[in-house]
C-alpha cells in the first residue's frame, strides 16, 4: 500500500516540477523579490558593455559625441526605437542635470521644451534649492512651466512654494488646483510651516493655498484645522478653507465632518458636478463609512439637497457592484428622497458596469412607480452608452402598459432629445419593426431642425405615421425645413391635399420664418388668401414678433378674421406691447377700435406681470 | 494486470495531472493572478523589484536610468510590473518601461492593466500611474497592430475604464490608421469625443472618394462630421467638381459637412467657377450649404461682392449665416470696415446677425477691448439685436471671468444683461454663499431683483434645503416671502412630499392654504402625501 502511495506521490511531484520548469519566468538581471521578504540593501552594479547591449550602445554614443551635449541629444532624439530613445534621453538629461543644469535648461527650452519637466525633476531630486533658484532664473519660458512642478517642489523644497507662486502667472483656467495640491503636500509633512507659508500669500492663490493646508491638516486633526479656518477673516478664502477642512476631515472622521456642515457655506461651482461642500464631504464620508453616511442622511432630512447627494455617486457605483441588492434596497425604503437621481447619474457613469445585476434585481421586485423610475434611468443610460443593446432590450420587452412608458423613454433617449440626430439613420436602419414607428415619430418631434438636410427622405416617411398623428408630424417637419429653406417648405406644404394638415404646416412655417426673417415671412403671409390658413399663419407671425416687434405683431393680430384666433393673437401682441411699454400698450388698445366685448376680454385676460413671465428679459 | 495495479496507474495519472496543474498555478506571477481575479477577490501581494526600488530612490544621474534600462533589457513581460513598481511615481521612467512592456507583449500588458483597473487606484501594490501605462500601451499597440488593439477593446466586457481606454485607442489610431480609427469610433458608438484630425487630410488625399465613403458610412457624432470637413479640404485640391457630385448624394448631415469645405477650397483657387457651380444648383438646400463655403472664401477677398451675392441669392437662415460669416471675417481684419458693412444693411435679422458677429470678434479681442465693444453694442437701436449679440459671448465670459460678469450686471451697461446672464451670475453667487448672494441681489436694479433671488433660492435648495427654508421662514410678510415660500414648496413638493409637508406645517395657516391651492393641478396621489406629511407630529 505504502509503495503505491509513494508511486502516486512521485507522479504528482513530477508533474508539479515539470510544469513549473516549463512555466518558470526567465529571470531578469535583478530578480524581483516579494514585498514581504525584504532583501539586504545591496548596491546594484551596472552591467558592463559586454553584458548589456544597451550599456554598449550608450557608451558608443558617449564616445562618438564626446562633450558635445547638443549633438548627443540630437543623436538620441533621432533614435528610431522608442524604448532606446526614451531610455537614453532620460539617462542623458539626468546626467546633464548634474554636470551643467543651466545649460541643459537653456538647450531644452529652446530645442525640446516638452522635456523641460524631466530635467527640472532630475534637478530637483539632486539639488532642490539650487534647482528652484535656477528654474526661477530661467526666464519667462521656464517660469510659465513651473506651475506643473508645484507638487514636485512641495515634496523637496516646500519652503520655496510661496516664492515660486509669487513669481509665476495665475492659472489660466478655473479647474487648476495646483497651488491647493502643493500646499496639501506641504501641510501633510509640516502643518505649522505650511500654514505660515499659506498665510503669507497675498495674491489670488491665497485661497487655494489655505484650502490645501486646511484639507491636509484636517485629515490629521480636524478640530484644530477647523478652529484655524474659523478664525480667519470672513470672506471667500475663509469659506474655501472651511469647506476644505470638512472634506479633509471626512476622510478620517466622517460623522464629525458631517456634523459640522453648517459651519461652511455650501460653495460649489455652477459648472462643476457635485462640487459643493456637502457633496465633497459626502464623497469622502461615503467612501470611508457608507452605512454611517446613509444613516446620517436618514437622520438629517433636508440638510443636504439633490446636488449635494451626487457626492454619493462614485461610492454608490462601486457598491452597486459589490452589493447590488443591498444598495438597491436603499431606494425601496424611500427614506432618502433624491437618491434616485444619484442612481440615474451613477448608471450613466461607472455604475453602468452593473447593468445586468441591477436589471435582475429589478425584475424580482413587484411593479410600481419606483421600479419603473429606476428601470427608466437604466434604459436611458443603455440608450446613451450602447444604443444597439438598448434597441435589442426594448424590442424584447412585452407589450404592457408599464413597458409602454419605458419604451417611450428609451426611444427618446436613443437620440437624446434630438442632440444625437446624426445617429438617427443608423438607428432607424437597425430598429426592429416594433420600434421603427416610435423612433420615427420621435425623430419628427425632436429632430425637426436636423432632418431637413434630406427633405425627400422625410417626406416619404410621413406616410408611415398613422393618419391621426400625421398632421402633427407634418407640422414639425415643415417648421424644421423652414429654418433652412422656407420657400421650398412653403412650396411643399401648399401642395398638401389635406386642408387641415396644410394649414397647420403653413402656420408652423410662418412661425419659424418670422423668427429668422420677419419681413420676408410677413411678405409671404400677405400673399395668402383670406381664410383659416392665412389666420393660422398670421397667428404664428404674431407669436414670433410679439417680443421683438410688438407693434408689428399687434397690426398682424388685428388682421386675423377668425374670432378665436384673433382673440389669442391680440392677447399675445398685447403682452408684447406691455412688456415694451405699458403706456404704448394702452394707447394701441384705445386706438384699435375694438368691439367692446373684445376689449373687455383682453383686459380681463391680462394679469399683472404676465408679460414678464412669458417674455423674460 | 490486476485491479490494484490499474488503480495505481489511474491514481498516478491523476496525480500527474494534478501536479501539472499545481505547478502551472505556482508559476503564474501574482500580477497575472490579479489579472484573472474578479476584482471582488482579495488581490495577491504584488511583487516589487526591491533592489531596483532602492536604487531608484538613492542613485543619481545617468546611472539610475541605466540600471533600470539594463534590467528592462533582459526582463520578460511578467517582470515588468515589478520594475514599474520600483520606478514608482517617476512618470518618465514608468512611461519608458510601459513602452517596452507594450512591445514585449501588449496582450499581457492589457490583461494586467484590466485587472489593475478593477481595483481602486490606492490599493496596496497597485501599479503606479495606471493611466500613463494605458496611454503608452495604446500608443505602441495602435502602431504595431491596429486590428489587434481594436479587437481587444471590442471583446473586453464593459467596465468603468473601457470608454476612456477606447478614446485613447481612437486617438492613437487617428495618428496612423485613420480608417480603422473612424470605423472603431462608429463601432464603439463614440459620439462625444474628438480626436486630433491632422492626419485625416493626408489619408484623404490618397483617395478622397474612398475616404469620404468611409467617413459617411461610419458617420456617428461630431468626429465623423469633422473628418468629412478635412476630407473636403483634401478633395477640393484634386477634383472639387467630382467631390461635390459625390457630396450631393450623401444624407443631410454628411453633405453639409463635406460640400461647403470642398466648395471653400475650390473658391479659394477659382472663385468664378465655384460661384458658377453654386448658382447652378437647383436643390436649394444643397445650394445653401455650398453658399457657406463660397462666401467664406469670397468674403476674405471681396466682402462687398460676397455680401451682395448672399443678399441676392440666399434667404432665411442661410443668408443670415452667410452674412454673419462674411462680417466676422472682415471684423477680424478691420472692425471699422465691418461696421460700415453693417450700417449699409437693411434693418432686420440679417443685420442683427452681422452685428452679433462684429460684436463677438471685438469682445474677444481681449479684456481691454470689452468696454469699447459693449459701448458699441449698447448703441444698437434694436433690443433683440443687442440681446442676441451678447448671448454669443455670454457663456464663455461667465466661464472665464465670473467676477467681470458680476460687475457688468451692476455696471453702466447693466441694461444689456439678459435674464439668462443675471440668472447665471445669481447661481454663481449662490454657489459661494447664498446669504451673501441674497444681499447682492438686493442691490440689482429693481426689476432684476426677483429673478435673481429666485435663482439663488433654487440653487440653495439644491444644496442646503434646510438653510433655504429657514431663510424663507424668517422673511417678513410680503411679495418676497410669498415668492420664496411658493418656490420652496414647489421644489420640495415635487422632490419629497414628506419634506414639503414638514415645511408647510411650520407656516401660518393662510400661507399653507395658499400654497396648497397652487398645487391644484398636482397629481392627487402626490398631493395627498404632502397633506399626510403636514399632519405628522413634529420630529423630536
Image (cartoon, rainbow, N blue to C red):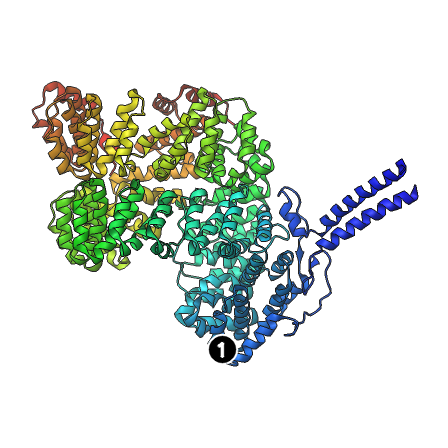
Q: Residue furthest front?
A: B1
Seen in the picture, residue A256 relative to B233 is either above or below; the reply is above
The quadrant in which the N terminus of chain A is found is top right
Q: Chain of mark 1?
A: A
Seen at 33% across and 38% down, the residue is B453
Q: Left or right of A580: which side holds A367?
A: right
Q: Residues within 10 Å of mark 1 (few under 14, many from 20)?
A: some
Q: Residue furthest bottom?
A: A67
Q: Left or right of B307: which side holds B74?
A: right
In this orientation, which residue lies closer to the viewer: B469 or A125?
A125
Q: Is residue A579 visible?
A: no
Q: Is residue B193 visible?
A: yes
In this orientation, which residue lies closer to the viewer: B386 or B296?
B296
The quadrant in which the C terminus of chain A is found is top left
Seen at 19% across and 24% down, the residue is A568
Q: Position of residue B125 (x, y in %)?
A: 64, 53
In this orientation, which residue lies closer to the viewer: B354 or A265?
B354
Q: Left or right of A215: which side holds B38?
A: right
In this orientation, which residue lies closer to the viewer: A387 or B83?
A387
Residue A259: quarter of image: top right
According to the picture, the residue beneath numbered tag 1 turns out to be: A69
Q: Position of residue A410 (x, y in %)?
A: 42, 30
Q: Position of residue A261 (x, y in %)?
A: 50, 42
SS category of the residue bearing label 1: helix
Q: Position of residue A196 (x, y in %)?
A: 51, 61
Seen in the picture, residue A188 relative to A45 is either above or below; the reply is above
Residue A511: quarter of image: top left
Q: Left or right of A288: which side holds B142?
A: left
Amino acid at each position: 500500500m505504502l509503495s503505491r502511495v509513494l508511486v502516486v506521490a512521485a507522479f504528482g511531484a513530477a508533474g508539479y516540477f515539470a510544469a513549473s520548469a516549463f512555466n518558470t519566468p526567465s529571470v531578469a538581471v535583478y530578480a524581483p523579490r516579494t514585498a514581504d521578504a525584504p532583501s539586504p540593501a545591496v548596491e546594484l552594479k551596472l552591467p558592463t558593455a559586454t553584458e548589456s547591449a544597451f550599456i554598449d550602445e550608450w557608451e558608443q554614443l558617449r564616445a562618438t559625441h564626446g562633450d558635445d551635449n547638443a549633438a548627443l541629444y540630437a543623436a538620441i532624439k533621432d533614435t528610431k526605437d522608442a524604448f532606446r530613445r526614451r531610455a537614453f534621453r532620460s539617462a542623458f538629461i539626468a546626467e546633464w542635470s548634474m554636470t551643467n543644469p543651466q545649460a541643459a535648461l537653456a538647450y531644452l527650452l529652446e530645442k525640446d521644451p516638452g522635456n523641460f519637466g524631466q530635467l527640472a525633476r532630475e534637478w530637483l531630486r539632486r539639488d532642490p534649492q539650487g534647482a528652484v533658484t535656477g528654474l526661477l532664473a530661467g526666464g519667462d519660458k521656464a517660469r510659465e512651466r513651473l506651475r506643473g512642478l508645484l507638487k514636485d517642489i512641495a515634496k523637496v523644497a516646500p519652503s520655496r512654494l510661496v516664492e515660486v507662486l509669487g513669481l509665476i502667472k495665475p492659472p489660466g483656467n478655473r479647474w487648476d488646483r495646483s497651488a491647493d495640491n502643493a500646499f496639501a503636500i506641504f501641510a501633510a509633512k509640516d502643518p505649522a510651516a505650511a500654514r505660515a507659508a499659506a498665510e503669507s500669500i497675498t495674491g489670488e492663490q491665497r485661497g487655494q493655498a489655505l484650502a490645501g493646508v486646511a484639507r491636509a491638516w484636517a485629515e490629521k486633526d480636524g478640530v484644530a484645522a477647523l478652529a484655524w479656518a474659523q478664525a480667519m477673516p470672513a470672506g471667500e478664502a475663509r469659506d474655501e478653507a472651511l469647506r476644505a477642512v470638512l472634506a479633509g476631515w471626512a476622510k478620517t472622521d466622517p460623522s464629525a465632518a458631517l456634523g459640522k456642515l453648517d459651519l461652511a457655506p455650501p460653495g460649489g461651482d455652477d459648472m462643476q458636478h457635485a462640487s459643493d461642500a456637502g457633496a465633497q464631504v459626502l464623497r469622502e464620508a461615503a467612501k470611508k463609512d457608507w452605512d454611517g453616511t446613509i444613516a446620517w442622511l436618514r437622520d438629517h432630512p433636508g440638510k443636504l439637497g439633490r446636488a449635494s447627494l451626487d457626492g454619493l455617486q462614485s461610492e454608490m457605483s462601486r457598491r452597486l457592484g459589490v452589493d447590488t441588492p443591498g444598495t438597491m434596497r436603499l431606494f425601496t425604503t424611500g427614506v432618502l428622497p433624491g437618491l434616485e437621481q444619484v442612481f440615474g447619474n451613477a448608471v450613466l457613469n461607472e455604475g453602468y458596469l452593473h447593468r445586468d445585476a441591477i436589471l435582475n434585481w429589478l425584475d424580482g421586485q413587484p411593479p410600481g412607480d419606483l421600479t419603473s423610475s429606476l428601470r427608466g434611468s437604466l434604459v436611458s443610460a443603455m440608450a446613451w452608452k450602447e444604443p444597439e443593446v438598448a434597441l435589442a432590450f426594448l424590442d424584447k420587452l412585452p407589450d404592457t402598459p408599464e413597458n409602454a412608458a419605458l419604451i417611450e423613454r428609451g426611444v427618446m433617449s436613443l437620440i437624446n432629445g434630438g442632440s444625437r440626430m446624426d445617429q438617427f439613420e443608423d438607428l432607424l436602419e437597425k430598429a426592429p419593426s416594433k420600434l421603427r414607428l416610435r423612433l420615427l415619430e420621435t425623430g419628427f418631434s425632436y429632430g425637426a431642425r436636423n432632418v431637413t438636410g434630406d427633405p425627400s427622405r422625410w417626406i416619404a416617411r410621413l406616410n408611415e405615421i398613422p393618419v391621426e398623428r400625421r398632421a402633427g408630424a407634418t407640422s414639425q417637419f415643415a417648421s424644421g425645413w423652414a429654418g433652412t429653406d422656407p420657400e421650398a417648405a412653403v412650396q411643399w406644404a401648399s401642395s398638401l391635399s389635406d386642408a387641415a394638415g396644410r394649414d397647420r404646416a403653413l402656420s408652423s412655417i410662418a412661425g419659424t420664418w418670422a423668427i429668422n426673417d420677419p419681413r420676408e415671412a410677413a411678405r409671404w403671409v400677405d400673399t395668402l388668401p383670406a381664410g383659416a390658413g392665412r389666420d393660422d399663419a398670421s397667428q404664428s407671425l404674431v407669436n414670433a414678433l410679439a417680443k421683438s416687434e410688438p407693434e408689428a405683431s399687434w397690426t398682424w393680430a388685428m388682421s386675423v378674421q377668425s374670432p378665436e384666433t384673433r382673440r389669442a393673437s391680440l392677447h399675445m401682441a398685447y403682452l408684447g406691447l406691455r412688456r415694451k411699454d405699458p403706456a404704448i400698450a394702452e394707447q394701441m388698445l384705445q386706438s384699435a377700435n375694438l368691439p367692446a366685448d373684445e376689449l373687455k376680454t383682453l383686459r380681463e385676460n391680462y394679469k399683472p406681470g404676465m408679460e414678464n413671465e412669458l417674455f423674460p428679459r | 494486470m490486476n485491479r490494484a495495479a490499474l488503480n495505481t496507474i489511474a491514481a498516478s495519472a491523476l496525480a500527474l495531472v494534478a501536479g501539472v496543474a499545481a505547478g502551472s498555478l505556482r508559476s503564474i506571477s501574482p500580477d497575472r493572478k490579479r489579472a484573472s481575479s474578479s476584482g471582488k477577490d482579495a488581490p495577491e501581494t504584488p511583487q516589487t523589484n526591491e533592489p531596483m526600488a532602492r536604487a531608484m530612490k538613492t542613485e543619481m544621474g545617468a546611472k539610475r536610468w541605466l540600471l533600470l534600462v539594463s534590467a528592462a533589457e533582459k526582463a520578460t513581460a511578467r517582470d515588468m510590473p515589478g520594475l514599474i513598481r520600483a520606478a514608482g511615481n517617476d512618470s518618465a521612467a514608468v512611461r519608458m518601461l510601459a513602452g517596452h512592456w507594450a512591445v514585449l507583449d501588449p496582450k499581457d500588458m492589457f490583461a494586467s492593466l484590466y485587472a489593475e483597473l478593477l481595483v481602486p487606484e490606492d490599493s496596496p501594490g497597485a501599479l503606479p500611474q495606471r493611466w500613463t501605462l494605458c496611454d503608452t500601451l495604446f500608443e505602441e499597440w495602435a502602431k504595431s497592430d491596429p486590428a489587434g488593439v481594436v479587437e481587444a477593446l471590442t471583446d473586453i466586457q464593459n467596465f468603468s475604464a473601457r470608454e476612456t481606454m477606447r478614446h485613447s485607442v481612437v486617438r492613437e489610431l487617428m495618428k496612423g490608421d485613420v480608417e480603422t480609427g473612424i470605423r472603431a469610433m462608429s463601432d464603439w458608438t463614440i459620439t462625444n469625443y474628438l480626436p486630433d484630425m491632422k492626419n485625416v487630410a493626408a489619408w484623404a488625399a490618397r483617395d478622397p472618394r474612398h475616404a469620404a465613403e468611409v467617413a459617411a458610412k461610419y458617420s456617428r457624432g461630431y468626429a465623423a462630421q469633422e473628418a468629412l470637413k478635412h476630407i473636403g479640404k483634401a478633395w477640393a485640391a484634386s477634383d472639387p467638381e467630382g467631390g461635390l457630385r459625390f457630396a450631393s448624394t450623401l444624407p443631410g448631415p454628411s453633405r453639409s459637412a463635406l460640400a461647403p469645405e470642398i466648395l471653400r477650397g475650390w473658391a479659394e483657387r477659382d472663385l468664378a467657377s465655384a460661384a458658377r457651380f453654386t448658382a447652378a444648383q437647383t436643390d436649394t438646400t444643397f445650394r445653401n450649404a455650398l453658399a457657406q463655403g463660397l462666401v467664406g472664401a469670397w468674403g476674405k477677398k471681396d466682402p462687398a461682392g460676397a455680401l451682395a451675392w448672399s443678399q441676392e441669392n440666399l434667404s432665411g437662415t442661410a443668408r443670415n449665416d452667410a452674412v454673419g460669416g462674411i462680417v466676422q471675417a472682415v471684423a477680424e481684419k478691420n472692425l471699422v470696415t465691418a461696421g460700415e458693412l453693417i450700417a449699409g444693411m437693411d434693418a432686420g435679422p440679417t443685420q442683427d446677425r452681422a452685428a452679433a458677429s462684429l460684436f463677438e470678434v471685438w469682445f474677444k479681442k481681449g479684456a481691454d477691448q470689452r468696454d469699447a465693444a459693449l459701448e458699441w453694442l449698447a448703441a444698437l437701436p434694436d433690443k433683440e439685436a443687442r440681446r442676441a449679440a451678447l448671448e454669443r459671448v455670454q457663456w464663455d465670459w461667465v466661464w472665464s471671468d465670473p467676477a467681470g460678469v458680476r460687475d457688468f450686471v451692476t455696471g453702466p451697461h447693466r441694461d444689456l444683461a439678459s435674464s439668462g446672464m443675471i440668472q447665471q451670475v445669481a447661481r454663481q453667487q449662490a454657489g459661494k454663499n447664498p446669504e451673501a448672494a441674497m444681499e447682492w441681489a438686493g442691490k440689482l436694479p429693481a426689476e432684476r431683483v426677483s429673478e435673481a433671488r429666485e435663482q439663488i433660492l433654487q440653487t440653495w435648495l439644491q444644496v442646503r434645503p434646510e438653510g433655504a427654508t429657514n431663510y424663507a421662514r424668517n422673511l417678513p410678510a410680503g411679495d418676497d416671502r410669498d415668492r420664496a415660500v411658493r418656490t420652496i414648496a414647489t421644489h420640495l413638493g415635487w422632490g419629497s412630499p414628506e419634506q414639503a409637508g414638514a415645511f408647510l406645517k411650520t407656516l401660518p395657516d393662510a400661507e399653507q392654504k395658499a400654497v396648497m391651492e397652487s398645487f391644484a393641478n398636482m397629481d392627487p396621489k402626490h398631493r395627498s402625501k404632502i397633506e399626510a406629511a403636514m399632519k405628522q407630529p413634529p420630529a423630536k
